Amino acid sequence: MTIHLYMGNEAIGMGAVHAGVRFVAGYPGTPSTEVLETVAKANDGSIHVEWSTNEKAALEAAIGASWSGARALVTMKQVGLNVASDPLMTLSYIGVKAGLVLVVADDPGPISSQTEQDTRSFGKFSKVPVLDPSSSGECYGMIQDAFEISEKYSTPVILRPTTRICHACGTVKTRGGIADCAPAEAFKHADVDENDPSWDEGRTKPEGFVRDTLRWVVFPRTSYENHGKVERRATQMAEDFAESYHPNRIEMSGKRRAYNDPSWQNLGKASDAASFGVACGGISYHYVREALERLGADVPIMKVSTPYPFPVKMAQSFLNMCDEILVVEELDPVIERELVSLCGQDYLKRTIHGKLDGTLPYAGEQSVENVTKVLAGLLGIPAEQAAFTSAGDLATAPKPAIPARPPVLCAGCPHRASFYAVKKAVGKRPAVFCGDIGCYTLGNAAPLDMVDTCVCMGADITIAQGIKTVDPEKIVFSFIGDSTFFASGITGVINAVYNRHDIIICVLDNSTTAMTGMQPHPGTGHTMMGVDGSAVSIPAIFDALGVDNVTVNPLDAEAAQAAVRDAIEKTGVRAIIFKSPCVNISKPLHPPVVINQETCIGCHKCIDQIGCPGIIIRDGRVEIDETLCFGCQLCRSICPTGAIEKGEE
Amino acid sequence: MSNTVPEGAYPLMDKALQNGPLNCVICGVGGQGNVLASRLIADMLLAKNEHVKTAETIGMAQRGGSVMSHVRGGHPQSPLVPRGTANVMIAFEPGEAVRCIDFLAPDGLIVVNTRATQSPSAALERSSYDGTDALAWLEELPTATVLKVDGDAICKQVGSPRVLNIVLLAAAVKTGAIGCTREALEDAIRGRVKERFHAMNLKAIDLVFGA
């Protein structure tokens, strides 16, 4: 047993390794990315780890691994599950052989996502059980439980951490660190009888795929039968989760017990405090506990760690204990709706506070601060006790103005140069710029202002087709990154070719998946197994589809603008591949540029046209921040007096 | 200015440890080494057998935007430091200290780098932001303590802007506010940072401690 400081995602990765996972696939997406990277780091070569082209490909590959007898893990962010939903819905009916677990990270806030969708609701929709960890420690344990549950009930299982779980570190007791965690050792899972010779063989050497068409081939007739089985399975799991899954619990005065512990009997009648209770799950559980500690209040807490199938019996016990319940959860009111529904079913008259009655907001994260305030109000505790007075509240002078600091494209980022080339070449002609998901979404900010639409991975190419059809007077561009192009852009290109659309596709190829932290993708040829495979060529894909395409270095401003002007003159589907590596995976091409203060006329064109963080104003003068400048030379092509000079090599 | 860091003057964190969770926030601009600073504090507390939780900004918000890390020792529930409860704030530049001031406890300590980090949006607005107003405002806070550190001067002596996080962290350690020793910080660096960067980080600590 070793104590480590693990980020939630690291704890999940290590837990999966210790559970004997053999096949791991995923697509990068904040806040889920580090799970797969952790497994890759710990891998001694016996685990297959891959970044798949997208989440659907990842899940389908994992299904094949599970059906061949190897424990499989799939990782993605919540919107990734939308892409993988097609195989998941059917897999839920067919079931698994070896354990198959999806780690789907939700993002309340949202902090870096398009939606605040709730994977707990997706679990209910797809009838797939969902485990909801509340700390790094629970991440480590629950991922191992998830594999056991998957095999016991023959179902895929979703582990759903949220950003504050994924990216928070906590102390975790594990059976070893990344360095001393050889998977061969890891297969000796605590709950398994190591003396049973068949077990070790079964785990280390997967059985392989065994033909069984009635089981692995989906037919309407078998689906009818499986539907009934799936519903019975859910009912059974709900009972088992309430009875014996210890992260589900009711606790009071720091005592944690199963719901059916006899000492809870008559609690509601014995104590006034117990007529009020709090139901919660995930990170909200810790917000609630901290709020109660702060207020010095002692009320029963029901922690729901399996939001689907809902632990009905535990909840019924809690409803019998409390007349009034506050439900604290992020995203959808999942626990709250279950409680309201149980009140109806059991003819109980209870007051339930939460999102449905407006006590807590639907959108955004929960916090210790807002939970404390709401609890103080409901418990009749004076507002002063719930105040969070800060040093800033006691300030006597008004706060000084400080600059806004939204995320921006890095100094030297080739995307800035690509956007600038298109902007210059288009000039005053009416045009639409369809954007996509990645660092280059930041091209929407002033002064570039080059993103008019953004929906989901790959949508730039297809939305452009709809816009051009209805609004043919405008030139319609679509911008897509290299990883996004592989993930879901190609289908849209084929659609454009087949249906004879008229768009200019700009592939911003920086040779990495930059936004999520430099993951390789099919275009790079690098794999998570350390083997350099065959890189997939984007120009070759366009050639094969008969799409007129040209590759240009965006940092060569003249050539890049010429390529865009050329494309504007043509019609049909044409593509420009702007190819230059991300600054985070390459060394500066040149030393920082230098501003000649003698010849600088202070026109600020360099600042106003490209908004590079490396160009700053200090004491009224335009200067270069040498710690940031990447020497890309883009600004030099803008300066009307040639005052931006090449730095000395 | 490094020599003006008063040794052992603010044993706030030790006091906080006895009274509940101790809280630290680290604020700055994406890319300044915020996450490493937060992990090093966590490592030092862990070495003292504290239960630790941290929360960091990772992902889209990193790219040159405002970032903030939370570190909590003792027996924290939430990984996030609640408003008005940070015993110590380590600020990589003055404006970010002002932005995050609501996290600081009324009697908290601010360890702040004196040099302002420019922002492209400020340049677009022709703002001449240089951090002077921000520093003056922080110093006028009636109940908080401000420790100004000329981090850039030490970075120049070390020869790398990358050690700013260690400079500020060492200054905070020197005051006693983190409740950890210089040796604990050096151990944490050896345990977490790649070996080829040890020398420059240890040199930064030497310069802060005036050894």
Image (cartoon, rainbow, N blue to C red):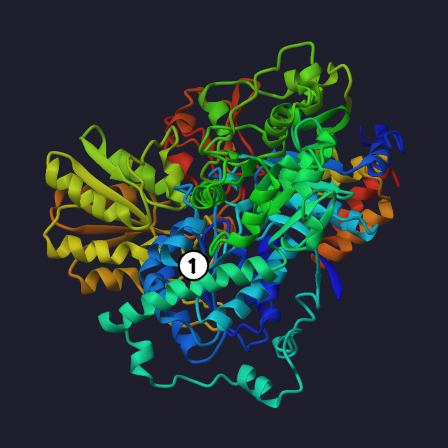
Crowd tier of the residue under label 1, counting other residues whose Cα lies within 10 Å: few below 14, some 14–19, many 20 or above: many
Mark count: 1
Three-letter amino acid code at the position of disc 1 = Tyr
Q: Viewer-proximal residue, A236 or B143? A: A236
The answer to which image quadrant residue B209 occupies is top right
Q: Viewer-proximal residue, A564 or B12? A: B12
- In the image, A241: left or right of B76? left
The answer to which image quadrant residue A483 occupies is bottom left
Above or below residue A595? Residue A588 is: below
Q: Which residue is mark 1?
A: A27
Residue A46: tell me if it is visible.
yes
Q: Chain of mark 1?
A: A
Q: Position of residue A394 (x, y in %)?
A: 71, 15
**Residue at 33% over, 69% down:** A226
Q: Viewer-proximal residue, B123 or A306? A: A306
**Residue at 11% over, 46% down:** A571
Q: Position of residue A236 (x, y in %)?
A: 47, 64
Above or below residue A213? Residue B182 is: above
Location of the N terminus of chain A (image quadrant) = bottom right
Q: Secondary structure at mark 1?
A: loop
Q: Viewer-proximal residue, B79 or A525? A: B79
Q: Position of residue A464 (x, y in %)?
A: 20, 43
Above or below residue B51? Residue B3 is: above
- In the image, A378: left or right of A586? right
Residue A353: tell me if it is visible.
no
